[in-house]
Image (cartoon, rainbow, N blue to C red):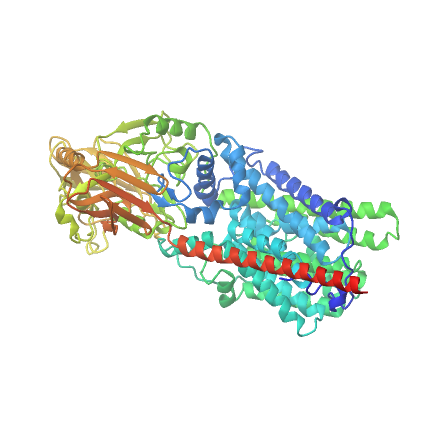
Amino acid sequence: MNRTTLTGREQGVKPAGGEERETEPARRLDADPRWAAALLAALLTTAAFCTADVVARSYPFGSHTRSVNDLGNQYVPFHAHLWDLLHGRADGGVVFNWQSGYGSSFLPDIGTYVSSPFALLVGVFPRDEIDLAVYVITVLKTAVAGAAMAWLLLSLRRGRWWAAGILGTSYALCGWSLALASFNPMWLDGLIALPLLCLVGEWAMAGRRPLPSVLIVALAWIANFYTAYMATLGAALVLLLRLVLAELPWRRAPAVVGRAAVVVGLGVGLAAPLVIVVYSGTKHAYPGREGHFAPVGADDLFARLLPTTYSYSSPALYVGITALVLALALPFHRKVPVRVRAGWTVLVLAVALSLQWAPTSLAWHAFAAPNGSSYRQAFVLCALLVIAAWHALAYGLPDWRALGPAAVLLALVAAVAGRSTLTQQHSHHTWPVVLLAAAGALGGLALLSLRNGRPLLAGLAAVLLIGAQFGEAAATSAVATHMRLGQMDDYAPWGDRQQRESDAVAEADAWPRYRTEPGRDQTVANDPMMVGGQGSQYYSSLTADVLSRTMTSLGDGWTSRGRSLQSLDNPVTDAVFSVGARVHNPPDPHQKWLPQGGGPSTVTREDVPPLVTVRPAAARTTPAAFGPSPYRNQELLLGTRVYTLPRTTLSGARKGDEARGLLVDGAQTLTARCRAGSEAFLWAPHYSGTAQLAGGEQQLYRSDAEGTKIAAMQPLGTVRASGQIRIDLKPNRLSRVPAQGAVGCLDTGRLHAAVQQLKATGATEVTVSDGTLHARLPAGSTGTAVVAAPRIAGWRCSAGGDEVAASEFHGLIAVPLGASATSLTCTFHPPGLRLGTAVGGASLLTLILLGAFSALRRRTAVRSGERTTTAH
């Protein structure tokens, strides 16, 4: 950590290629070409990115929404909740989110989705422009990534500043950025982190700037630890190669590696309070899909090197034809030292092969198979291609002996890629763009080599290279935007529908006296964060296992294999979770597959118990586990029998299907008998289609055969005086309904009596702030206090001032009460926060001590020098 260690020629450091590196000259910042290169890269990136959206008529420049897949379902809502936090309008705080999943830990979500410093910019936008805020943040992050790479290139080796700016743009607008990260904006922090971490490696080689290095590492890991991990691995590979090429004395190289390791360790340690909390959150999350790696073929791999190709499941390696030609020319460029040519070529090939091998792919993804794209680390290879291209340019322009073989290799890449369906399905625009970009790249490089000091030719070459990069990047981005919109679910940006929902929720909201559900007819999976209220809807990579399993046992539906919970429109669960107001919305007109119909958002209100209820002493014993029937499971939580489960008959049912459920293939009828006046419900989690009780409202059920989504229990209407139930089923695919137990008839009178009993013994007052809940209980309360919130890990409670362990009552928080308990206080402590804080504190203390020791050594050295001068 000593700034005087290994600095410049006096320590015998040789840069790549054996030439001695000039010491950094003392000059004004405005004379440093890195600033000009970074500015050019940022401007080109911004212009190309926005131009692509203009061409694609995508938001905010057109009528097509950007909110596809998780961008609309997760990331925009999390930024909306961050906006509410910044403006003091959220129910909860940094530690706990009372709005989603009936109460969820929020710090892990912050670390996963909105911990980037850029995310704070949402606070300067109006709340109803949250989609624009996320778009601006996305563009800004992408531009900063280009600027950071341009700065790095000129730090590695001097060269033309405008060429560094072009290559910085090619990195910022690489295929990975355009195809994946542009709608996963938190990943863009990794795109920024990689060149900055490579700079940290450069400073470690020179023994300079230890404090900024530690802060950069810490910010990278705080902003997005997932891609920061990949970026750290990539930067480590770059540093090791730089050490090999520098030909350091064998004793000096370990010192550099050790210095870099200390910097990374301290930086990650400073980020530990967030990183360890996120890691702990994944341990308590509902398990997602188990991914299995399967490498793509060479034709698809090469196709993704070309512009305007798109695929979610193959590595997006496009960096622009100019950068690709230069990288291909590097092995043949005789002005570049052999060691440099060989080193960067081998590193690029090695990383490319690591993308295609299952063990190394797993290592790149932190030893957890990704749920989705298997090539999330592709941006590292894109960076290496750009750095290799810079070395081919910075040592001197490649001549025809290098560009000729590069052109041949480019033709071979195109020939192999031509066999891929990725190019065949887009051949009408892929090949014209490839030809124009190749002509611009090769023409520009040829003009540069022929200019002989003539500025006109140099300017024309720059125009050709910039134009080629700009055009192909804009075309690639536009195609990716169009393809995503055609292949993934999409959601409308904030508009009249969301505003009506938000107004209806705000008018009915009385938290924490009761919850307000934003409604089953949701706009996005995280509606509570978007429009307000306190619902069961919640979609996160960190959705708690106990929440998902509890709600599924109660008849709730979900998507994303259990990590995206829906609203359960049921009066029994509303009573259990203290849902006193429920918003009913018309179908979302943006979703064309839904039955279309207008109308305002309406609100129904129910008399429900408070958030904290008191159950009899018998509840202290371990309650019976949930069974297969969601109706009986709801009764266990309510404490009263309120359902009748009649025998059902399915017309045309096939024999032998009862174990897995009865097959429904075409229009069929489900019949049963119940008491007149009761409310009929249908639970059919693996049914997809419509169900309608005679004389009732048609309800839509959504599930799939792959098990990524199941349908929620829904109310069908009131049973007629005859007691006959006839449910018309019209499936949209081959489906199943339970052989028995699909229909439940609710006795509303019994439910009302149960609610009144729970109100009479429940808390008289409940207050909530961030992760703390306080309730006043009636005098003489005994038994078990049950909090209407999932018993996720991290809750600690005290009853009457006595610290007690928070136990579980069918997935909810339960606290045994003593004879004198008149109050209950529960506090949430995110798992891992204590350990993370300890690690972070130790790292900060170590950093302070090292800084003090370094300052003391410098002062001692100065005084020693002064005494020596005085003696002479």
- The quarter holding residue 387 reads bottom right
**Residue toward you, 110 or 707:** 110
**Residue toward you, 459 or 303:** 459
For the view shown, which residue lies furthest in the bottom direction? 250
For the view shown, which residue lies furthest in the front direction? 871
- The quarter holding residue 449 reads bottom right
In the image: residue 764, left or right of residue 98? left
Q: Quadrant of the C terminus?
A: bottom right
In the image: residue 184, left or right of residue 798? right
Q: List x then y, in percent, for residue 385.
A: 66, 58
How many discs appear? 0
Examine the rendering and report whether any part of residue 408 can be seen. Answer: no
Examine the rendering and report whether any part of residue 46 can be seen. Answer: yes
Q: Is residue 201 shown above or below 113?
A: below
In the image: residue 515, left or right of residue 114? left
Q: List x then y, in percent, for residue 705.
A: 34, 51
**Residue toward you, 437 or 776:** 776
Q: List x then y, in percent, for residue 519.
A: 33, 34
Q: Residue at x 20, y 39 (%)?
A: 822
Q: Quadrant of the N terminus?
A: bottom right
Q: List x then y, in percent, for residue 427.
A: 61, 50
**Residue toward you, 515 or 326:** 515
